[in-house]
Amino acid sequence: MAGLIKREDIDEVRQRTDIKEVVDGYVTLKTAGLGTFKGLCPFHDERSPSFTVRPQVGRYHCFGCGEDGDVIAFVQKQDHSSFQEAVEKLAARIGYELRYEDGGTGPNREEVGRRQRLLDAHKIADEFFRAQLLTPGAAEARTFLHGRGFDRAAAEHFGCGYAPQGWDALLKHLRGRGFTDAELKLTGMFSEGNRGIYDRFRGRLIWPIKDIAGDTIGFGARKLYEDDQGPKYLNTPETALYKKSQVLYGIDLAKRSIAKDRQLVVVEGYTDVMACHLAGITTAVATCGTAFGTEHIKIARRLLSDDGTGGEVVFTFDGDAAGQKAALRAFEEDQRFTAQTYVAVEPSGADPCDLRQSRGDEAVHALVQSRRPLFEFAIRTTLKQFNLDTVEGRVQGLKASVPVVAAIRDASTRTGYCQALTGWLGMPDPNEVLRLVNAELKNGAKRGETAGPAGPAARTAASTAQPGGPGVAAGPSSGAVPSYHRPDPRDPVASMERQALEVALQEPSLLGGGIWERFSSARFVTPAFQAVHDAMRATDPALTADPVRWVEQVMHEVPEPLRPLVSELSVVPLPASTEEAVQKYCRDILSRLFELQITRVKADKMGQLQRLDPAADPETYQRLNRELMMLEMERRSLRAEA
């Protein structure tokens, strides 16, 4: 199992990765000044581009919504991946072999290459299956889709395909594309017999199973012919790419809607996902032949930004006994994350695909809208096992329901369901239910069970978090953070100070030599800008030779409320269109800053001089005059250089 990635390797990946090339894969960028690019923000809806990328400093900033960060943060937010996953993806992109702390291991260069070959094979197979769906031999597959209410456009949107009935159609195709049998065995797309390998999927309707980034990592296949002796549904077996406990079908299509709407709808099958999306429920996903488990919860957490403030997970199950059992199993998993969890069960037993066919899109919406809290569903399902019209049945129902209520971790919610259970049982005193639930909690504590919020997922999150978070080293905690008012852009001094910081962040190489000493001794009038300047002074001046690391370290040193300001200053386009013009602009701005500093020092010394009695202290009087003369010479020299 991989440990934490070494800090120096994280820095190396960040350094070597061109942020513009990465962002270009998601956003159309256009030049917005020398070394600066703009596009429509991928994190909020806008008509005019305000998303700015500055490759030289390795950062992006949206002037519309305020989203900002480095290339690792961008991949995290765009792909809804963890910090470590984002670093590993970028490392694979540039062919960099990561090292891990605590003796952990990660993918080496050979493994990265092997993974890419597997991805390439799946991509080609995906294209092959999709093309086959349009051939005469795929008539049965097209009939199946049409019979479920899916036209050609829907099939194309979800990447549906067809596996020919022969034994080696895909095998020949991939061999022809340069793949060896040894490589193909690792894909899970082939079975092996006495004569070698042969196609695993034959005469079946195909769905590509993709990861959250949109890469095909496996396939689901439904049989179409009566003489097919295989199971109704056949999936890719576990491979280096495909782990069914870590995959949600449709996640690549649903991830943006899930993050935007803060809702995730879990259905049971591929056609249910298709039906939901076509009906407008674009947050629907499905597990792939397994129960919704811990790894799926991790995906849900990232997409919902799960913080217990309104995100919801809706499980839809068939109304039969198996569906109820699945819902109760989901109840157990719910204790591992804090999103509000619901169950939507269609009493008729119809799944979303059947509902859409028989009653239209509105019926699918109605199913999701009819959701009930999962806790309520679990308790009511337990009570249904007993005859509540009898005293004996109510007592049995109470005894069976108490452990279910006691399993609810949130104390307020638990108390609320004690009262609800009292009403469902027709009992006069809710305190009796509360007493039994509390007794169950105490017994559970003696058995070593807990009902607190720090469940397995919380502990897992705490133990696997990369120190320092997304691209920022973990720093010492400070006391109360002062508040900073946003500088008035109409203030000429504040405007000049802002321009000086833009230059210092974006062109730090100009601060080399004696310039650094002069810059670091400057004083800024605007408190927010002074705090940014203090952060620069606290940063190793040797880093000015490396713009990416320079900005990163300044971000680390600055008070957290000002990090968005630093991000903004580091990417805002400088008003120059050529490299020569940029250099001249930067020198002019720094000269103006230094001249302002000299003017302030001169004013201070002039005040001292005017307050001084020359006869009482002739020595100090002469020293101040000499210093004023030197300051004036320095000011004129700056003017001449500019």
Image: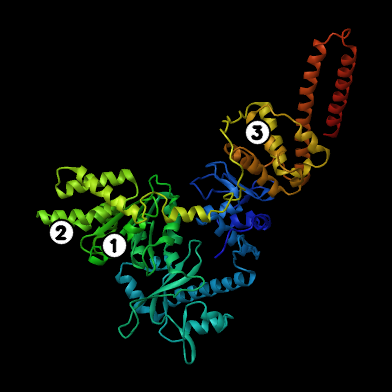
- Reply above or below: 380 against 514: below
Q: Mark 3 or mark 2: which comes first in sequence?
A: 2
Q: Mark 1 or mark 2: which comes first in sequence?
A: 1
Distance (Cα) linking label 1 and label 2:
22 Å
Q: Is residue 103 shown left or right of residue 188?
A: right
Disc 1: CA contacts within 10 A as few (<14), some (14-19) or many (>=20): many
Question: In this figure, which residue is indicated by the disc labeled 3?
Answer: 531
Location of residue 89 (image quadrant): bottom right
Q: Which mark is residue 426?
A: none
- Reply above or below: 213 against 504: below
Q: Mark 3 or mark 1: which comes first in sequence?
A: 1
**Relative image position of residue 253 (x, y in whole percent):** 44, 60
Give the residue displayed 72% in from the left and 29% down from the top: 523
- Residue 635 showing in the rendered view: yes
Q: Is residue 135 shown left or right of residue 318?
A: right
Question: In this figure, which residue is indicated by the disc labeled 1?
Answer: 317
Question: In this figure, which residue is indicated by the disc labeled 2?
Answer: 386
Of residue 169 and residue 381, the one placed in the foreground of this image is 381
Cβ atoms under marks 3 and 1 closer than 8 Å: no
Give the residue displayed 38% in from the left and 78% down from the top: 204
Distance (Cα) linking label 3 and label 1:
55 Å
Disc 3: CA contacts within 10 A as few (<14), some (14-19) or many (>=20): some
In front of the other: label 3 or label 2? 2
Of residue 608 and residue 210, the one placed in the foreground of this image is 608
Distance (Cα) linking label 3 and label 2:
68 Å
Give the residue displayed 57% in from the left and 74% down from the top: 117
